[in-house]
């Protein structure tokens, strides 16, 4: 095990860990005694669809019927089902309730189930080598029922990524039907039904359906989340389900570059403050929720560059192209129209300098002026030494095949080395040196994460993810995409209201606080991410938590790292999580 990880694990001694287990035991006993009878999950009609088997890990999609209320606006039939992608050992139990433990993962903002494919596989695989048969469930938020997948599923059959690009952006038909266009906020009133309460209730219903008894759930489940998914897991822990907190459903908690807490500034510990904030924030939240229903508040990011609907579709299409034709010269950008959303997104992610960004590469420095293989184009859009947006960054290798120049837009990577302030400046574009191509006549290629020795602007220790894995995940259509097409902004509002102290109205189910802190906790920080310097400093993790820092990892790398790292060790995120789960007994 890497010395950084080993030292972090040693920091939390056996005495503190024993105390945490004792508190967890007391909590479980109190919760069990309070139950007069076992609630029955409302989820039914379980269906399981095999997806793949690789290296001893079976992957399938499990779904349940759990209809939206009769009052919900018109919606696709898929929105009346909930599900998850299931990872398990091929030689392990076929029934989830018979697994040693089950990791239940909430995805980050915009993230679909394919987001967690690498960490899910790596954790189950590592646990298997340790003699444990665990499962990892990548939960699908209800809003993923609205994902635009037709083009991806069709391209997977034809083998031509341009079939998908032309379907979404150029009016090309698929099976006689044309894409009707990306939905606007006004087209998506059903998202008003898909706030935080729906997410945590869906998780509870699935957990209860698969493991019907509370005592079993308290032993089996490890509740986890990446990024925003960690925040959601904190609210799940403190939500009331049939007289029990969500924390009562879990043996332990784990967060990946995130925090699990519904009350980080301890508002609920002071009765007067508790009442005052609820009296102010609660009604304000009700007004905002009414704004969603009246279509005054935007329900989705929509036309926003970089994080909007088209921007995330471009990322998925770049992954599809790199998956289907990795070494071919990319034609994707030539098939994307010039419109404000697309051009602003590409300009921001690619611009080497402020001058290039302001002039939109008018002097020949725009991304469309250069030649790339499909893999190189994907790398330019997401790699930590290429893209200008930190939250998209992964360490997937290095640009090759031609000369490069250092990027200074929006900030040079070197500013992250400044004392104190540098840790926060990495939020804009990360801490690594970034480069851009300079010769439009050559075909730029890509060197994968495990082939960067000698590259002057990176080192093997900061390249941790296999771009082939990322491309395959981005190429996914049904049953779960990598990025949600229409992530509901209501979830962000709900989280903000809860953190602000609202405990009535939409937040009435949030009846506990700090319930997860009496359970064993595991926290994985990405060393090259800003999160640990913000969330980790302002909102400390539980004192008894096992904390690891993943060396060279970016934010998304905590769930997207390669199975084998450049130092020969297994993915630190999956391996240390598997060790934590094994320690639960």
Image (spheres, rainbow, N blue to C red):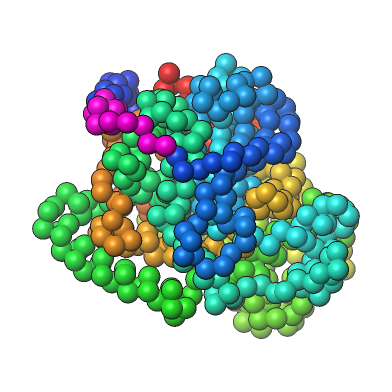
Residue closer to the observer: 78 or 517:
78
Q: Is residue 434 above or below residue 568?
A: below
Question: Residue 193's x, y, as percent?
Answer: 46, 62
Is residue 500 on the magenta stretch?
Answer: no
Q: Please give the name of the residue rendered at 43% of the width and 73% of the height, measured from the top-left corner.
A: 292
Count of marks, rendered view: 0
Most extreme residue toward the front is 70
Residue closer to the observer: 13 or 585:
585
Q: Is residue 48 above or below residue 446?
A: above
Which quarter shows the N terminus? top right
Asked whether residue 77 is in view, the answer is: yes
Is residue 29 on the magenta stretch?
Answer: yes
Quadrant housing residue 29: top left
Question: Residue 343's x, y, as percent?
Answer: 68, 77
Q: Is residue 514 above or below residue 445?
A: above
Q: Please give the name of the residue rendered at 55% of the width and 58% of the height, measured from the top-left corner.
A: 143
Most extreme residue toward the left is 272
Q: Is residue 399 left or right of residue 304?
A: right
Question: Residue 208's x, y, as percent?
Answer: 45, 36
Q: Which residues are magenta?
A: 28-40
Question: Residue 43's x, y, as percent?
Answer: 50, 43
Asked whether residue 347 is in view, the answer is: no
Which quarter shows the C terminus? top left
Residue closer to the observer: 53 or 433:
53
Q: Please give the name of the residue rendered at 25% of the width and 45% of the height, measured from the top-left corner.
A: 512
């Amino acid at each position: 095990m890497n010395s950084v990880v080993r030292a972090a694990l040693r920091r939390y001694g056996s005495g503190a860990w024993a105390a945490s287990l004792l508190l967890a035991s007391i909590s479980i006993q109190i919760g069990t005694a309070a139950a007069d009878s076992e609630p029955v999950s409302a989820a039914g009609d379980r269906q399981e669809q095999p997806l793949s088997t690789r290296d001893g890990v079976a992957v399938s999609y499990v779904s349940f019927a759990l209809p939206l209320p009769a009052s919900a606006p018109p919606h696709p039939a898929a929105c009346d089902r909930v599900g998850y992608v299931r990872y398990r050992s091929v030689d392990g139990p076929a029934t989830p309730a018979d697994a040693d433990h089950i990791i239940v993962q909430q995805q980050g903002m915009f993230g679909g189930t394919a987001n967690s494919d690498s960490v899910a596989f790596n954790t189950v695989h590592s646990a298997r080598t340790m003699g444990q048969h665990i499962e990892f469930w990548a939960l699908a938020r209800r809003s993923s029922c609205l994902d635009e997948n037709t083009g991806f599923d069709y391209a997977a059959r034809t083998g031509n990524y341009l079939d998908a690009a032309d379907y979404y952006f150029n009016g090309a038909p698929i099976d006689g039907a044309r894409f009707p266009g990306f939905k606007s906020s006004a087209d998506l009133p059903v998202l008003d039904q898909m706030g935080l309460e729906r997410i945590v209730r869906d998780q509870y219903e699935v957990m209860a359906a698969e493991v019907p008894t509370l005592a079993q759930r308290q032993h089996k489940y490890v509740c986890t989340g990446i990024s925003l998914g960690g925040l959601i897991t904190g609210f799940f822990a403190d939500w009331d389900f049939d007289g029990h907190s969500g924390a009562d459903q879990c043996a332990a908690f784990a967060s990946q570059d995130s925090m699990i807490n519904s009350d980080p500034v301890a508002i609920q510990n002071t009765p007067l403050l508790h009442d005052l904030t609820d009296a102010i924030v609660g009604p304000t939240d009700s007004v905002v929720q009414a704004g969603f229903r009246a279509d005054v508040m935007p329900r989705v990011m929509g036309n926003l560059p970089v994080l909007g609907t088209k921007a995330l579709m471009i990322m998925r299409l770049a992954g599809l192209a790199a998956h289907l034709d990795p070494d071919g010269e990319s034609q994707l950008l030539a098939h994307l129209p010039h419109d404000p959303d697309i051009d602003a997104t590409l300009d921001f992610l690619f611009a080497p300098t402020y001058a290039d960004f302001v002039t939109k590469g008018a002097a020949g420095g725009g991304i469309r002026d250069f030649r790339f293989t499909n893999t190189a184009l994907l790398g330019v859009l997401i790699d930590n030494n290429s893209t200008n947006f930190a939250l998209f960054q992964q360490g997937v290798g290095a640009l090759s095949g031609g000369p490069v120049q250092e990027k200074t837009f929006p900030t040079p990577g070197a500013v992250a080395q400044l004392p104190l302030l540098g840790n926060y400046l990495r939020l804009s574009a990360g801490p690594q040196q970034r480069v851009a191509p300079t010769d439009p006549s050559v075909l730029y290629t890509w060197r994968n994460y495990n082939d960067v020795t000698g590259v002057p602007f990176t080192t093997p220790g900061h390249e941790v993810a296999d771009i082939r894995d990322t491309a395959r995940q981005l190429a996914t259509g049904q049953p779960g995409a990598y990025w949600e097409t229409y992530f509901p902004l209501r979830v962000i509002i709900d989280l903000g209201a809860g953190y602000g102290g609202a405990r009535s109205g939409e937040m009435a189910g949030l009846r506990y606080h700090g319930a997860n802190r009496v359970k064993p906790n595991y926290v994985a920080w990405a060393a090259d991410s800003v999160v640990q310097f913000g969330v980790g400093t302002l909102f400390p993790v539980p004192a008894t938590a096992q904390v690891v820092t993943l060396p060279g990892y970016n934010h998304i790398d905590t769930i997207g790292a390669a199975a084998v790292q450049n130092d020969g060790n297994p993915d630190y995120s999956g391996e240390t999580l598997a060790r934590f789960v094994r320690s639960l007994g």
